[in-house]
Image (cartoon, rainbow, N blue to C red):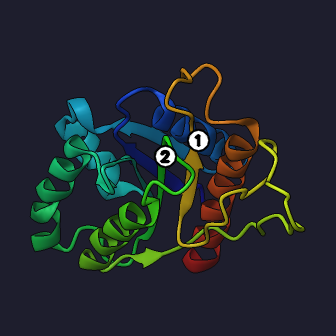
Amino acid sequence: MILSIAIVYHSGYGHTAKVAEAIAEGVKQTTAKVNVLKVDNFADTDWEKLDSADAIIFGAPTYMGSVSGPFKMFMDTTSKKWFEQKWKDKVAAGFTNSGSYAGDKLASIQQIFHLAMQHGMIWVGQAEAAPILGDNEIAQLDSINRLGSWSGLMTQANQKSGPDVAPPIGDLEMAKLFGQRIVNITAKLKK
Protein backbone atom coordinates (compact mmCIF):
# COMPACT_ATOMS: atom_id res chain seq x y z
CA MET A 1 0.00 0.00 0.00
CA ILE A 2 1.41 3.38 -1.01
CA LEU A 3 0.47 6.14 1.40
CA SER A 4 -0.64 9.54 0.20
CA ILE A 5 0.52 12.59 2.14
CA ALA A 6 -0.83 16.09 1.46
CA ILE A 7 0.92 19.27 2.51
CA VAL A 8 -1.35 22.31 2.39
CA TYR A 9 0.11 25.69 3.26
CA HIS A 10 0.28 29.44 2.80
CA SER A 11 3.54 31.35 2.45
CA GLY A 12 3.78 35.11 2.38
CA TYR A 13 7.48 35.64 1.73
CA GLY A 14 8.66 32.21 0.59
CA HIS A 15 10.08 30.94 3.90
CA THR A 16 7.09 28.73 4.75
CA ALA A 17 7.09 27.43 1.16
CA LYS A 18 10.71 26.38 1.62
CA VAL A 19 9.74 24.45 4.77
CA ALA A 20 6.85 22.78 2.90
CA GLU A 21 9.27 21.73 0.16
CA ALA A 22 11.68 20.28 2.75
CA ILE A 23 8.86 18.29 4.38
CA ALA A 24 7.94 17.00 0.92
CA GLU A 25 11.58 15.96 0.37
CA GLY A 26 11.41 13.94 3.58
CA VAL A 27 8.19 12.27 2.42
CA LYS A 28 9.78 11.47 -0.95
CA GLN A 29 12.62 9.65 0.84
CA THR A 30 10.01 7.04 1.81
CA THR A 31 7.66 5.02 -0.37
CA ALA A 32 4.78 7.50 0.10
CA LYS A 33 3.57 9.92 -2.52
CA VAL A 34 3.11 13.60 -1.71
CA ASN A 35 0.93 16.45 -2.97
CA VAL A 36 2.04 19.97 -2.06
CA LEU A 37 -0.85 22.43 -2.25
CA LYS A 38 -0.92 26.20 -1.79
CA VAL A 39 -4.08 27.72 -0.30
CA ASP A 40 -3.77 30.78 -2.55
CA ASN A 41 -5.29 29.19 -5.67
CA PHE A 42 -7.23 26.24 -4.33
CA ALA A 43 -9.20 24.23 -6.90
CA ASP A 44 -11.74 21.41 -6.63
CA THR A 45 -9.01 18.92 -7.56
CA ASP A 46 -6.99 20.14 -4.55
CA TRP A 47 -9.90 19.38 -2.21
CA GLU A 48 -10.05 15.89 -3.74
CA LYS A 49 -6.35 15.41 -3.01
CA LEU A 50 -6.92 16.33 0.63
CA ASP A 51 -9.94 14.04 0.87
CA SER A 52 -8.01 11.09 -0.53
CA ALA A 53 -4.83 11.67 1.49
CA ASP A 54 -3.93 9.38 4.37
CA ALA A 55 -2.33 12.32 6.21
CA ILE A 56 -2.59 16.09 5.90
CA ILE A 57 0.20 18.38 7.05
CA PHE A 58 -0.99 21.97 7.50
CA GLY A 59 1.38 24.93 7.41
CA ALA A 60 1.26 28.70 7.73
CA PRO A 61 3.54 31.52 8.70
CA THR A 62 2.96 33.13 12.07
CA TYR A 63 1.92 36.74 11.69
CA MET A 64 1.12 38.79 14.78
CA GLY A 65 0.81 35.66 16.95
CA SER A 66 -1.57 33.84 14.63
CA VAL A 67 -1.71 31.94 11.35
CA SER A 68 -1.73 34.13 8.25
CA GLY A 69 -5.03 35.52 6.95
CA PRO A 70 -5.11 33.40 3.79
CA PHE A 71 -4.54 30.24 5.83
CA LYS A 72 -7.28 31.24 8.29
CA MET A 73 -9.64 31.66 5.34
CA PHE A 74 -8.69 28.15 4.20
CA MET A 75 -9.36 26.85 7.73
CA ASP A 76 -12.83 28.39 7.73
CA THR A 77 -13.57 26.91 4.30
CA THR A 78 -12.89 23.40 5.63
CA SER A 79 -16.19 23.49 7.53
CA LYS A 80 -17.80 21.88 4.48
CA LYS A 81 -15.46 18.92 4.98
CA TRP A 82 -16.33 18.87 8.68
CA PHE A 83 -20.05 18.52 7.93
CA GLU A 84 -19.25 15.46 5.82
CA GLN A 85 -16.62 14.12 8.27
CA LYS A 86 -14.27 13.72 5.27
CA TRP A 87 -11.07 13.95 7.30
CA LYS A 88 -12.09 11.97 10.37
CA ASP A 89 -9.33 9.57 11.51
CA LYS A 90 -6.75 10.93 9.05
CA VAL A 91 -3.32 11.76 10.45
CA ALA A 92 -2.70 15.49 10.89
CA ALA A 93 0.35 17.58 11.67
CA GLY A 94 1.30 21.24 11.51
CA PHE A 95 4.19 23.58 10.89
CA THR A 96 4.85 27.29 11.09
CA ASN A 97 7.64 29.78 10.50
CA SER A 98 8.19 33.26 11.89
CA GLY A 99 10.81 35.96 11.79
CA SER A 100 11.67 35.80 15.47
CA TYR A 101 12.78 32.87 17.59
CA ALA A 102 9.52 32.66 19.53
CA GLY A 103 7.17 34.85 17.53
CA ASP A 104 4.25 33.23 19.34
CA LYS A 105 4.54 30.27 16.97
CA LEU A 106 2.94 27.99 19.55
CA ALA A 107 -0.31 29.91 19.12
CA SER A 108 -0.26 29.11 15.39
CA ILE A 109 0.48 25.43 16.01
CA GLN A 110 -2.39 25.37 18.50
CA GLN A 111 -4.74 26.91 15.92
CA ILE A 112 -3.76 24.23 13.42
CA PHE A 113 -4.09 21.55 16.12
CA HIS A 114 -7.60 22.72 16.94
CA LEU A 115 -8.52 22.65 13.26
CA ALA A 116 -7.38 19.02 13.12
CA MET A 117 -9.24 18.15 16.32
CA GLN A 118 -12.44 19.72 14.97
CA HIS A 119 -12.14 17.36 12.02
CA GLY A 120 -11.57 14.31 14.26
CA MET A 121 -8.04 13.84 12.98
CA ILE A 122 -5.12 12.12 14.75
CA TRP A 123 -2.40 14.66 15.63
CA VAL A 124 1.29 13.85 15.29
CA GLY A 125 3.84 16.20 16.79
CA GLN A 126 7.53 16.66 16.15
CA ALA A 127 9.82 14.23 18.00
CA GLU A 128 13.42 15.32 17.41
CA ALA A 129 15.30 16.21 20.59
CA ALA A 130 16.36 19.80 21.13
CA PRO A 131 20.05 20.54 21.66
CA ILE A 132 21.27 20.33 25.25
CA LEU A 133 23.11 23.55 25.92
CA GLY A 134 25.24 24.90 28.73
CA ASP A 135 25.45 28.37 30.23
CA ASN A 136 25.79 31.14 27.67
CA GLU A 137 25.37 28.72 24.74
CA ILE A 138 22.86 29.10 21.95
CA ALA A 139 21.75 26.52 19.43
CA GLN A 140 23.66 26.69 16.15
CA LEU A 141 21.82 27.26 12.89
CA ASP A 142 22.56 23.70 11.77
CA SER A 143 21.06 22.21 14.96
CA ILE A 144 18.01 19.99 14.76
CA ASN A 145 15.06 21.39 16.76
CA ARG A 146 17.08 24.45 17.81
CA LEU A 147 13.82 26.16 18.84
CA GLY A 148 12.72 23.27 21.10
CA SER A 149 9.28 22.47 19.70
CA TRP A 150 7.35 19.22 20.07
CA SER A 151 3.74 20.22 19.39
CA GLY A 152 4.51 20.67 15.72
CA LEU A 153 7.32 21.80 13.47
CA MET A 154 8.53 25.34 14.19
CA THR A 155 11.12 27.09 12.07
CA GLN A 156 12.58 30.59 12.04
CA ALA A 157 13.82 32.86 9.27
CA ASN A 158 15.33 36.26 9.90
CA GLN A 159 13.07 39.03 8.66
CA LYS A 160 15.74 40.44 6.34
CA SER A 161 16.65 37.03 4.87
CA GLY A 162 15.22 35.89 1.59
CA PRO A 163 13.96 32.32 1.12
CA ASP A 164 17.17 31.45 -0.71
CA VAL A 165 19.10 31.57 2.60
CA ALA A 166 16.45 31.04 5.27
CA PRO A 167 15.22 29.15 7.20
CA PRO A 168 18.62 27.76 8.14
CA ILE A 169 19.85 24.27 7.27
CA GLY A 170 19.06 22.75 10.68
CA ASP A 171 15.41 23.80 10.42
CA LEU A 172 15.14 22.40 6.91
CA GLU A 173 16.78 19.11 7.92
CA MET A 174 14.29 18.86 10.77
CA ALA A 175 11.49 19.48 8.27
CA LYS A 176 12.68 16.48 6.24
CA LEU A 177 12.69 14.34 9.38
CA PHE A 178 9.19 15.61 10.18
CA GLY A 179 7.95 14.48 6.76
CA GLN A 180 9.46 11.04 7.32
CA ARG A 181 7.89 10.84 10.79
CA ILE A 182 4.43 11.58 9.42
CA VAL A 183 4.81 8.77 6.88
CA ASN A 184 6.08 6.33 9.53
CA ILE A 185 3.27 7.07 11.98
CA THR A 186 0.65 6.98 9.23
CA ALA A 187 1.95 3.59 8.07
CA LYS A 188 1.70 2.20 11.61
CA LEU A 189 -1.87 3.43 11.96
CA LYS A 190 -2.91 2.07 8.55
CA LYS A 191 -1.80 -1.50 9.38
Q: Is residue 29 toward the left or the right of residue 89 in the image?
A: right
Q: Is residue 31 toward the left or the right of residue 4 in the image?
A: right
Q: Residue at x 49, y 40 (%)?
A: 99
Task: Name the image quarter holding residue 135.
Answer: bottom right
Q: Residue at x 23, y 68 (%)?
A: 86
Amino acid carrying label 1: it is Ala
- Quarter holding the N terminus is bottom right
Q: Is residue 184 toward the left or the right of residue 45 in the image?
A: right
Residue on which the image places disc 1: 24
Q: How many marks?
A: 2
N-terminal-most mark, 2 or 1? 1
The answer for how far apart the CA atoms under marks 2 and 1 are is 16 Å
Q: Residue at x 57, y 44 (%)?
A: 156
- Residue 190 location (% of width, % of height): 55, 75
Q: Is residue 103 visible from the viewing direction of this image? A: yes
Residue on which the image places disc 2: 97
Q: Is residue 148 toward the left or the right of residue 124 in the image?
A: right
